[in-house]
Image (cartoon, helix red, strand yellow):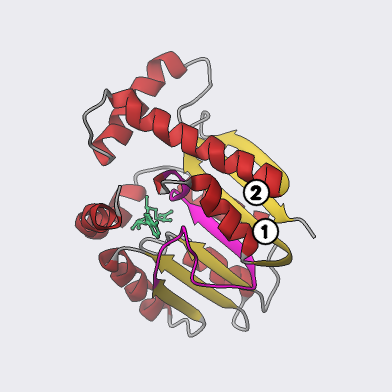
Amino acid sequence: MTVSETQAAYGRWARAYDWFVRLLPGLDGLRAGAVADLDLERGDTVVDLGCGTGANLPHLREAVGPTGTVVGVDLTPGMLAAAERRIETAGWRNVHLVQGDAARPPVDGVDGVLGTFVVGMLADPAAGVRAWLDRLTSGGRVAVLEATRTTHPAGGVLNPVFDSLVAAGAPGNGSDSDASRTLDARVTEARDALAVEGSLLRDERRVAGFVRTLVAEQRA
Ligand SMILES: C[S@@+](CC[C@H](N)C(=O)[O-])C[C@H]1O[C@@H](n2cnc3c(N)ncnc32)[C@H](O)[C@@H]1O
């Protein structure tokens, strides 16, 4: 998707997004796990790329505490507006939002980079995650969560349902499975780049194989 297509699609989604993700059981636990994988300390600085409505922000704020800094970056003004409401309601003074592109993160020298359900939207995910590693301080970590087709034995039945859901979110001219196969390929490209450019600490599939977790550390 182009920048304007992403902004239009997620601009339409912004109000319903939080309601929809509440229907996905266990997602908040996966977010908490990805934040734990960043191994942040109090006072650290962390960036959430493609932060959307800010669903990761409570976990990140908890990890860095009141003396740390959390920056959420997203392309879509409507999603950022929802994240801003979340920050105002919580009264966090050290959580900031920037409209920007996750492919060229507008930050540097951070202790952790989180990207949940965004790496599959990058046209060049390998270049994207290389840029994420570049923005880290020594020993800093990147954590990625992304939806993928499952390799579970029940995939023959379950993957067509997943394909339809992904295709509904990324309409195109191909068959339903084209969009999810593109998504899978992008996650694998990101994984390979993290393994080559950093130290890959985790590559796991959860939720019957539909969510892939990647964690890498910046190589000193
Ligand atoms: C599926 S939502 C995920 C939101 C959030 N990370 C979460 O886990 O709920 C994808 C988000 O990524 C944003 N996005 C897509 N491409 C982006 C890019 N290149 N740079 C920054 N944000 C992007 C969209 O605007 C949207 O808010």
Identified by mark 1, the residue type is Arg
Judged left or right of residue 99, residue 44 is: right
Residue matched to label 2: 215
Identified by mark 2, the residue type is Val
Residue 101 coordinates in the image, percent (x, y): 41, 63
Q: Residue at x 54, y 50 (%)?
A: 127
Kindly indicate the quadrant of the structure image that contains residue 62. bottom right
Residue 35 is at least partly visible in this image: no
Query: Tag 1's secondary structure?
Result: strand
Whichever of callouts 1 and 2 sits on the residue coming sooner in the sequence is 1
Residue 192 coordinates in the image, percent (x, y): 62, 39
Question: Are circles 1 and 2 on residues that touch, CB within 8 Å?
Answer: yes
Judge the density around disc 1: few (<14), some (14-19), many (≥20) Cα neighbours within 10 Å.
many
Front-lying residue, 91 or 140: 140
Q: Relative to 38, is 208 above or below? A: above
Quick check: is the Cβ at mark 1 less than 8 Å away from ligand 1? no
Residue matched to label 1: 141
Query: Tag 2's secondary structure?
Result: strand
Q: Residue at x 40, y 76 (%)?
A: 87
Q: Residue at x 66, y 75 (%)?
A: 44
Q: Residue at x 53, y 22 (%)?
A: 151
Judged left or right of residue 149, residue 114 is: right
Q: Which quarter shows the C terminus?
A: bottom right
Tell me the quadrant of ligand 1: bottom left
Judge the density around disc 2: few (<14), some (14-19), many (≥20) Cα neighbours within 10 Å.
many
Q: State the extent of the magenta-drawn residues as a range.
A: 99-120
Q: CA distance from mark 1 to mark 2?
A: 7 Å
